[in-house]
Image (cartoon, grey):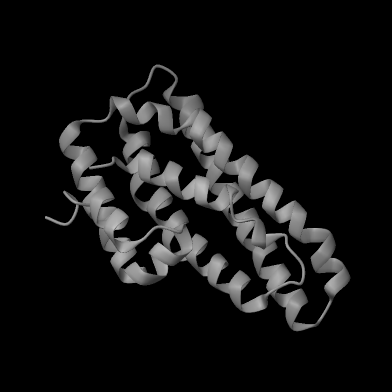
Amino acid sequence: MADLAEILILEHLAIKNANWIVDKPYNPEAFTRFRIYLKACHIEVEEKICFPILESYSFPDAKQFRERAERIKADHKLIDTLALNIIRWGESENAPLISERMPLFFRLLVEHNTSEETDLFPRWDSIDSLEMKSSVRDAMSIIESFGVKEYTTAVGINESAFSYLFRSGQQ
């Protein structure tokens, strides 16, 4: 079984390799689906499961860590606002603004994910093994609510790989 940080890192890798996001022409349906995945699944797992568990631990730099986690949560709001603006610009057929902002959106998202991988996820090794297992089960619940097929499509893995990653989270 993969742990939650490993699953989130896999999702970050899928995002980093999602070059279609900045490809032209803008595909409003695909971008809207991607934004829904980010908001309803990826960010939900981070903010409802991963971050609270990490914030509950007494790291020597707990105050600074919590501040960093709060900044990362604020990044989520910024990224989602930009995604919603891109969707709105698409609806008003403002192609020049989409062309200008889409690379910014992608760069911010990738840089944000890199900061999570550098500043937060390495601390996951400090987490109790029972809490690790329950976090995967909790993530599985969010993913099932989102839709397993939609999740595997968004992340770019097949159902066999999904079952392997979450094999003990399904028990």
Q: Quadrant of the C terminus?
A: bottom left
**Image location (x, y in percent) of residue 96:** 88, 69
Q: Residue at x 39, y 16 (%)?
A: 60
Task: Decide if residue 145 is on the left or right side of residue 9.
Answer: left
* Residue farthest left in this picture: 171
User: Looking at the image, which is closer to me, 107 or 156?
Assistant: 156
Task: Decide if residue 15 is on the left or right side of residue 51.
Answer: right
User: Looking at the image, which is closer to me, 21 or 144?
Assistant: 21
**Image location (x, y in percent) of residue 24:** 77, 67
Q: State whether residue 153 is above or below residue 132.
A: below
Quarter location, residue 125: top left
Q: Residue at x 51, y 37 (%)?
A: 116
Quarter location, residue 58: top left
Q: Quadrant of the N terminus?
A: top left
Residue 66 shows in this picture: yes
Residue 147 shows in this picture: no
**Image location (x, y in percent) of residue 48:** 36, 52
Quarter location, residue 5: top left
* Residue farthest bottom in this picture: 92
**Image location (x, y in percent) of residue 126:** 29, 25
